[in-house]
Image: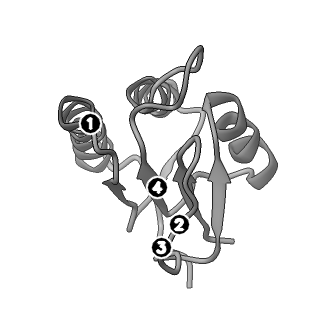
Amino acid sequence: MSYSVFIDDERTPKTQAPVGDWIICRNLDSFKYTLFIQGEFPSHISFDHDLGDNEQSGKEIANYIANTLLDKIYTIPEDFTFNVHSANPVGSENITGTLTQIVEIMRSYGRVAPKKK
């Protein structure tokens, strides 16, 4: 089952999910729980950077994603996409840089899940 994740501590998505339905995650723990329950990596993720006081940032979620992919805990879908909807320009650049690099690495080593029909 393909799905999309919207990571934001306050907002809800204003658009239809690019793939499947949106699952809203307010912090890293809810993102981890979503991965566990779904049993597979989302096809699309929309990131906010600043996730509230005493919460890890969107950049830290991007780092978690990179580590789980490198550790072969999850595999990204072949058609995986992401966007950053954060108003924080530095945080947005950091998330984009981290995810762009890890996605390129996974694709270059053929560590992607085939597109579901």
Q: Which mark is residue 10?
A: none
Q: Are marks 1 and 3 in contact (CB under 8 Å)?
A: no
Pair 1/3: label in front? 1
Q: Work out which residue is located at the far bottom of the displayed protein and give it.
A: 117
Q: Which mark is residue 88?
A: 1
Q: Residue at x 61, y 70 (%)?
A: 2
Q: Residue at x 70, y 29 (%)?
A: 29
Q: Are marks 1 and 2 in contact (CB under 8 Å)?
A: no
Q: Secondary structure at mark 4?
A: strand
The Cα–Cα distance between marks 2 and 3, rounded to whole angstroms, is 25 Å
Dot 3 amino acid type: Lys
Query: Which residue matches tag 3?
Result: 115
CA neighbours of label 3 inside 10 A, class few (<14), some (14 to 19), many (20+):
few
Query: Which residue matches tag 4?
Result: 45
Dot 2 amino acid type: Pro
Color theme of the render: one colour
Pair 2/4: label in front? 2
CA neighbours of label 2 inside 10 A, class few (<14), some (14 to 19), many (20+):
some
Q: Quadrant of the C terminus?
A: bottom right
The Cα–Cα distance between marks 1 and 4, rounded to whole angstroms, is 17 Å
Classify residue 50 as left or right of residue 53. Answer: left
Query: Which residue matches tag 2?
Result: 13
Query: Relative to the observer, which residue lies in front, 54 or 22?
Result: 54
State which tag comes first along the sequence, 4 or 3.
Answer: 4
The Cα–Cα distance between marks 4 and 3, rounded to whole angstroms, is 16 Å
- Reply above or below: 12 against 68: below
